[in-house]
Image (cartoon, coloured by chain):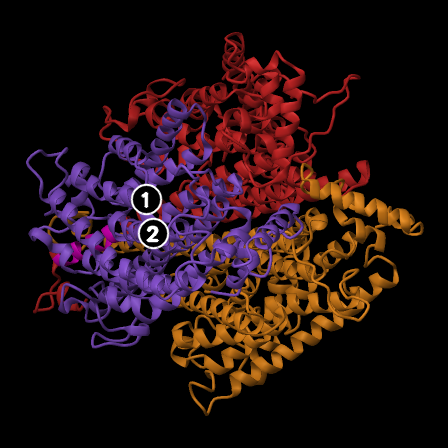
Chain colours: A orange, B red, C purple
Amino acid sequence: MDSTYFFADDGTLNATGLVTGFNELKQVVEDNVSGLDTMFVLVSGYMVFLMQCGFAMLTAGSVRTKNTKNVLLKNILDACVGAIAYYLFGWAFAYGGDSKINGFIGSGNFALSASSEGDFDDFTGFFFQWAFAATAATIVSGSVAERTSFYAYISYAFFLTAFVYPVVSHWVWGGGFLSNIFGHGMIDFAGCSVVHMVGGFAGLAGAAIVGPRYGRFNAEGKPVPMPGHSATLCTLGTFMLWFGWYGFNPGSALGISGGAYTVVARCAVTTTIAAAAGGITTLVLKKVMDHIFDLLAVLNGILAGLVAITACCAFVEVWAAVIIGAIGAAFPIHGAVGFWGALCSGIFNSKTYQAAAGLPDQQGGFVMDISEWKLFASNLVGCIIIVCWVLVLIVPFFFALNVMGLLRISESEELIGNDISKHGGPAYPNDPVGELEETNVSDSLAMDPDSSKHVDEV
Amino acid sequence: MDSTYFFADDGTLNATGLVTGFNELKQVVEDNVSGLDTMFVLVSGYMVFLMQCGFAMLTAGSVRTKNTKNVLLKNILDACVGAIAYYLFGWAFAYGGDSKINGFIGSGNFALSASSEGDFDDFTGFFFQWAFAATAATIVSGSVAERTSFYAYISYAFFLTAFVYPVVSHWVWGGGFLSNIFGHGMIDFAGCSVVHMVGGFAGLAGAAIVGPRYGRFNAEGKPVPMPGHSATLCTLGTFMLWFGWYGFNPGSALGISGGAYTVVARCAVTTTIAAAAGGITTLVLKKVMDHIFDLLAVLNGILAGLVAITACCAFVEVWAAVIIGAIGAAFPIHGAVGFWGALCSGIFNSKTYQAAAGLPDQQGGFVMDISEWKLFASNLVGCIIIVCWVLVLIVPFFFALNVMGLLRISESEELIGNDISKHGGPAYPNDPVGELEETNVSDSLAMDPDSSKHVDEV
Amino acid sequence: MDSTYFFADDGTLNATGLVTGFNELKQVVEDNVSGLDTMFVLVSGYMVFLMQCGFAMLTAGSVRTKNTKNVLLKNILDACVGAIAYYLFGWAFAYGGDSKINGFIGSGNFALSASSEGDFDDFTGFFFQWAFAATAATIVSGSVAERTSFYAYISYAFFLTAFVYPVVSHWVWGGGFLSNIFGHGMIDFAGCSVVHMVGGFAGLAGAAIVGPRYGRFNAEGKPVPMPGHSATLCTLGTFMLWFGWYGFNPGSALGISGGAYTVVARCAVTTTIAAAAGGITTLVLKKVMDHIFDLLAVLNGILAGLVAITACCAFVEVWAAVIIGAIGAAFPIHGAVGFWGALCSGIFNSKTYQAAAGLPDQQGGFVMDISEWKLFASNLVGCIIIVCWVLVLIVPFFFALNVMGLLRISESEELIGNDISKHGGPAYPNDPVGELEETNVSDSLAMDPDSSKHVDEV
């Protein structure tokens, strides 16, 4: 641009030209901000979506051959059912247009419709939040695998993504009452409580009500090993989940413009270190205890490290990520790791990094400043409330399915495996294993005349 | 920057400083636009490339164990041969430097050389368009799997990526005659017709000329099931394809600067919803018809939903995506879904969203405005022309190969499987299945003394 | 913004308003630059991380079933051990705060601590460089697979990522002496020498000292084929590596702001073309020599093409990428391809493209300008120095482990396989193969009473 744009021929200032040029440039810059943030959130969301594939591979590898197709189908339907459920109801309850009118639940924008606040236009936000909802749902698939009925699982996936999870996300992230509890509010950056605890405790409740797999315990009540059919699939799934977590955690900054790039970069590093610390901790623990280098345990340790850092990844020092991941890896169950991770905010968060991420007035973790306990208390109480909410809804839900006989497949179907009884044949039809299993099942059915009558059930 | 940059010591304006500062800033902003768009298109292209892996896993899982390496090699060579073919010829025919001189075919920039319009510099565009060309090629691999000769397949892949596909993309996307047909032009945002119909109908023609696999129909002419060897690989491939589609569809905005971020975000959401609707539709249909929860059918339904939304993902309401995906999932073949998807533009497109994406003067779909039929007519006629183009080239191509005896492998090779007859051994050498198949094959060869003479053929 | 912001009511210029407005906008633009570059480097780094998964799948597919879990665990621990090692020491030696004080090794910022140059704040850089370090480490896993002890491998991974690799990266990329050798300096854009030669020659040394697998050669000294257990896993891994290379090569621009987008886009294209040329070259070579279309050879050829283009991807013409990839694919080992690739800078680099990437004063390759040999000489001598450094450190390291009896597993363990002897059971427990192998092993142990005493060793 030459100076004639700003100046008249006589050298005097062209006020209109100056303002126009400035405003045109400003518009381009603002579009760059929008484009940059949209791309950041969408690419992060794509990576979170790929976690569905990671969960599918991990869960498939963790079940016996005869239930492979079953668990794969459940995982892929999480994403499908979750998309429709979150589109019709989930977004509305979580962030719906008039959501600020109460602290409990959003409303408006059902099916992404217009609301009193105007036409729905946050497609980027919807995409990212759907991917999170589907993640919460899919966590359960492993807990209840191999013996839960298909209808029960699909109903549960719809219920969780349409209502249970969205309400919790409204409380913590959508301006609901937990975002201001004790006049301070929970801080759960990427969802230890909102996503992982919701999925984890729903799975725990489901597993308790469904009961263990047939033959899981012997006559003396001792557990019988039921190893999954492919450690390779488990490893593939875990790597994909780790990769996807870089969408989950850094992506939860919901933008990278302004100064957010420092927040995002810290998340990537703390996430990495916590995963590594979790994996190494489990390696050592299992070697000391069981005298083996246990691949599957290390994979679990990595995932536990990733879950544990999720709530506080943006706000902690890197050395804290080592501790958070290592301790997280020692917890036995998904929900408990999520709980630990949510508490870590109140233990390790730095006020400096919270301020950099736009939370200047919140207290940090008590390890960083011994006088500050509000954050820990908020997160502790918030977590307890969330666990109660999940159990109050999910326990009756599974009990009702159980009473209706819709929760669990029959014993004969479980012996045959879901793939043959429900899904038209084995996952690996050229594989003699499938045929062997089929033969064994025919034998066992032959010996158990009553069981065949269940085969055509749910 | 303090005020001395703009103002002299006496408070008068420093005209040169002001203009320099403004222009420097403007340059940074323009570089940001270029950097942002380049990154958006490249990352989208990387994801489209990963669809090659998805197709490879899906197709491998869909064939019998004895042809696994064959189909994997064909898929990986799609990408390799496609890269060289598109580099040498494809780009030139599609978008070559002097491409605007006629409506049929581009020219210039062969091997990305300089042309009368200057040195080639659109490496970003080349990368993205190559990934699309390779996708069009790879669609065919499944249609003709397990019995097509290796030479035939490689020749076809070169022909399609060097000529057949690029010309079609020139017509619709490169300023060719279909972009202005009926004085209106086709609108195919991400390639239902350009990519999926080209690949789908080429595959259909190939499959018809190659003929069915040996033993595919029994003596009464009824189809014999030939299940693929791994439903897990099919699922992995489908998840990767779904992930890659977020590069394919939103990436087709070819930039995210300016106001394009709204277009991109809409694409991500409509793509998701159509996939989900396709998957759920197939689940229900197969349960009602065949009484099984059919994993492979659901995977197909998801892919059909994804194909169906490809042409109009940027321009439709989310509720329309549900319909488009659900109906698409009911179509039996790839090419037909692509056709349906291309028509959907003329049915469901909204003029408002077309205008937001830079198409202010085009008519929308007739469901949105009953008086508007030009888009539907353009897309319908354009699709018919594209199908004719593909068949006119591909049918004689495959027939010529057939006449030369280069199209199909011998019966004995088909019985043995390509992996042992052509590729040096089974895909899973530790697996007793491979040995069993090998043994069976030796037996069958022993019983058929004539067949062994074919083993060293193509 | 209307004109009142810049102008007072009387029409005179509001100097303060103008400067404030300009500076506010400038801040937003600078944040956009930071956000854009951070996102570019992080997403590239995520893709480089996914190469860990690719290597794991490739290596797992390349070993026999009985060592699957072993090699998967080694690969996943590369990432974990590498993260802790690079966090504690690696970054400090490579790019540590006071790193400019000598040309040999960085110092400061151990454990990402503050240094005399201030608090550590380059989390983006750390993330990207960690992913590279882990890549260098993981290259070795395949070379020494199936017979190396677990402790030896973990020790090696720590040593390489904490010290061996970081020092080399300091020399070439961190302002060390090789960046100015002969008053000119090496140019290795994405790490042919720094990453692939370091990993490749470490693996070569390791393999030579560990010795071949038991039964690898027969009584006449001829090699016995030991095919890996899954060509599908090898293909999956190679596709993931190819995908990840788009993070590795274009990402090495370390930003996409300013004019870097042209550099990045060229990298994506040359990387693609070299991979394709490598794959096709190997296909033809193996067909001519061995009369088979060899999938595994093509995968190796693609990887060789990718390695070969890594040093010069930003600086060469596309036709050169064809040559570089094709010749690279003819080299038998990883380290040699890396060497060839590093020399390619001195052969094919264009000064024009070097200048565009910020290297205006460096000489190009001698093919482009016959008078210029400084770059070739610098890269040649630099590579020799790097090979010496690796061997001087790694050979004694492996020898020391060998002397302590920590390097290699016992013969009986090798016969059983690592999975059963060290990792608690087979990777595919439902698979009769695992049982068959176990049975065979019991038989062989029964016949070799001495071997059982080694079973509980390292």
Q: Nearer the viewer, residue A141 or A97?
A: A141
The percent coordinates of residue C64 (x first, y second) are 52, 46
Label 2: how many residues lie within 10 Å, few (<14), some (14-19) or many (20+)?
many
Q: Is residue A454 visible?
A: yes
The percent coordinates of residue A33 (x first, y second) are 38, 57
Residue on which disc 1 sits? C334
Highlighted magenta segment, given as a residue range: B17-28
User: Which amino acid, mark 2?
Assistant: Gly
Name the magenta segment's main secondary structure: helix
Dot 1: what SS?
helix
Tell me if B286 is positioned left or right of A97 in this view. right
Q: Nearer the viewer, residue A259 or B405?
A: B405
The count of marks equals 2
Tell me if C247 is positioned left or right of A119 in this view. left
Above or below, A416 against B439 in this view is below
User: Which amino acid, mark 1?
Assistant: His
Q: Chain of mark 2?
A: C
